[in-house]
């Protein structure tokens, strides 16, 4: 049996194109499962973070179709394969919600604090 792997994809494309629907179709046709996805509008574009999982062969099929989508819909993407054993937690997960007045440098200060 092949070892399951995960692929992380980040992508950005013009809001009016139907890329999200196409991505989910090629994921299904490639026999990959969507582990996690986040989609956000940024200006006139959509940005995606997606984690999919499958065998080496199914991820290769997905990658080939992703390259075709890049040409057809003018998307910009990056992808990286990650083996499942690389995903072991290295600490406790944190989630932060902050409500307050924004000021320059506040995000950098929060990241520095969380990194300690």
Image (spheres, rainbow, N blue to C red):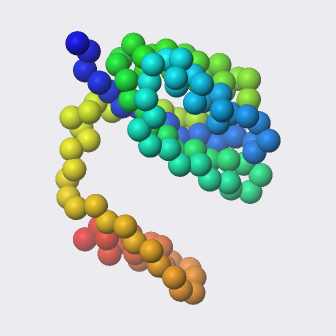
Identified at 32% across, 27% down, the residue is 5
Q: Is residue 113 visible?
A: yes
| Quadrant of the frame with the N terminus | top left
Residue toward you, 41 or 112: 41
| Residue 83: quadrant of the picture | top left
Report whether 40 appears left or right of 53.
right
Q: Is residue 103 visible?
A: no
Residue toward you, 88 or 29: 29
Identified at 77% across, 52% down, the residue is 44
Q: Is residue 1 above or below residue 72?
A: above
Farthest-out residue, right: 16
Identified at 58% across, 30% down, the residue is 24
Report whether 9 appears left or right of 23.
left
Identified at 44% across, 43% down, the residue is 36
Farthest-out residue, bottom: 101
Report whether 44 appears left or right of 115.
right
Q: Is residue 52 above or below residue 48?
A: above
| Quadrant of the frame with the C terminus | bottom left
| Residue 94: quadrant of the picture | bottom left
Residue toward you, 108 or 102: 102
Expressed as whole percent of the image width and height from the top left, the position of residue 109 reads 41, 77
Expressed as whole percent of the image width and height from the top left, the position of residue 111 reads 38, 69
Expressed as whole percent of the image width and height from the top left, the position of residue 63 reads 51, 21
Expressed as whole percent of the image width and height from the top left, the position of residue 41 reads 68, 54
Q: Is residue 27 above or below residue 64?
A: below
Tell how many labels: 0
Q: Is residue 90 above or below residue 53?
A: below
């Amino acid at each position: 049996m092949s070892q399951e792997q995960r692929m992380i994809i980040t992508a950005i494309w013009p809001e009016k194109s139907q890329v999200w629907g196409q991505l989910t179709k090629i994921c299904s046709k490639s026999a990959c499962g969507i582990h996690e996805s986040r989609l956000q509008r940024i200006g006139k574009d959509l940005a995606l973070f997606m984690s999919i999982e499958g065998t080496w062969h199914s991820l290769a099929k997905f990658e080939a179709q992703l390259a075709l989508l890049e040409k057809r819909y003018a998307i910009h993407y990056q992808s990286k394969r990650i083996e499942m054993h690389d995903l072991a937690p290295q600490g406790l997960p944190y989630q932060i919600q902050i409500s307050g007045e924004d000021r320059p440098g506040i995000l950098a200060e929060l990241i520095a604090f969380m990194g300690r």
